[in-house]
Amino acid sequence: MLLILLFKAKYFPNCDFLESRCGHSPSHAWRSIWGVKGVVKDGYKWSIGLGEAILFWDQNWLVYGNAIDKNVDLPEKLNSLIVADLWNHHLRIWNVGALQQLVTNSDIQRILHTPVLNLFKLI
């Protein structure tokens, strides 16, 4: 854990690993870790807990690691929509009515089949 904190402080203090840069004069260890970032980026998928850190558009959070592409005609206020915005916390179900306004039926089916961790049930 200490090594992770050291790399974070030195090489990517203001972003996460997937947004990090190699930097100037990187150590051999950091160059090696950073060098596989593309492989990690291509294969990662969010697990939905509270959904507050996951953007609804263009992030791999759906079942099988898929993303929902953002429509180019999307109103500005919906650009920063997060997954939690479409989850009904009281009923513990997806807000299907809101989803129908935003995405296709096939996207809705993928959303409904995406596992949600028990963290949503804590709200």
Image: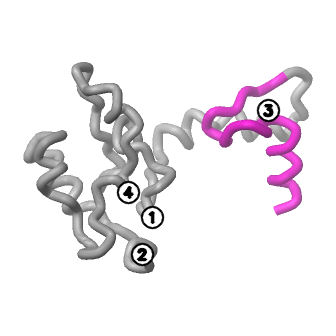
Report the disc number at residue 50. Answer: 1
Q: Could you tell me how far apart the alpha carbons at marks 4 and 1 are, in whole angstroms?
A: 6 Å
Instruction: Tell me the element at label 2.
Output: loop
Q: Could you tell me how far apart the alpha carbons at marks 1 and 3 are, in whole angstroms?
A: 33 Å
Q: Amino acid at mark 3?
A: Arg
Sequence-wise, the earlier of marks 1 and 3 is 3
Residue 101: percent from the left, percent from the top?
13, 42
Report the disc number at residue 31. Answer: 3
Q: Residue furthest left?
A: 105
Sequence-wise, the earlier of marks 4 and 2 is 4
Q: Quadrant of the N terminus?
A: bottom right
Q: Which residue is mark 4?
A: 84
Near-viewer residue (4 or 16): 16
Vertical order, 87 against 6 (above or below): below
Q: Could you tell me how far apart the alpha carbons at marks 1 and 2 are, in whole angstroms?
A: 8 Å
Image quadrant in which you'd find residue 91: bottom left
Q: Could you tell me how far apart the alpha carbons at marks 4 and 2 are, in whole angstroms?
A: 11 Å
Does residue 20 belong to the magenta stretch?
Answer: yes
Q: Could you tell me how far apart the alpha carbons at marks 4 and 3 are, in whole angstroms?
A: 35 Å
Q: Amino acid at mark 4?
A: Ala
Q: Which residue is mark 2?
A: 123
Circles 1 and 2 in contact, beta carbons < 8 Å:
yes
The residue sitting at 88% across, 38% down in the picture is 10
Image quadrant in which you'd find residue 33: top right
Task: Give the number of the mark in front: 4 or 3.
Answer: 4
Sequence-wise, the earlier of marks 1 and 2 is 1
Instruction: Tell me the element at label 3.
Output: helix
Left or right, residue 76 beside residue 119? left
- What span is in magenta? 1-23
Q: Could you tell me how far apart the alpha carbons at marks 3 and 2 are, in whole angstroms?
A: 41 Å
How many residues crowd mark 3 within 10 Å: few (<14), some (14–19), many (20+)? some
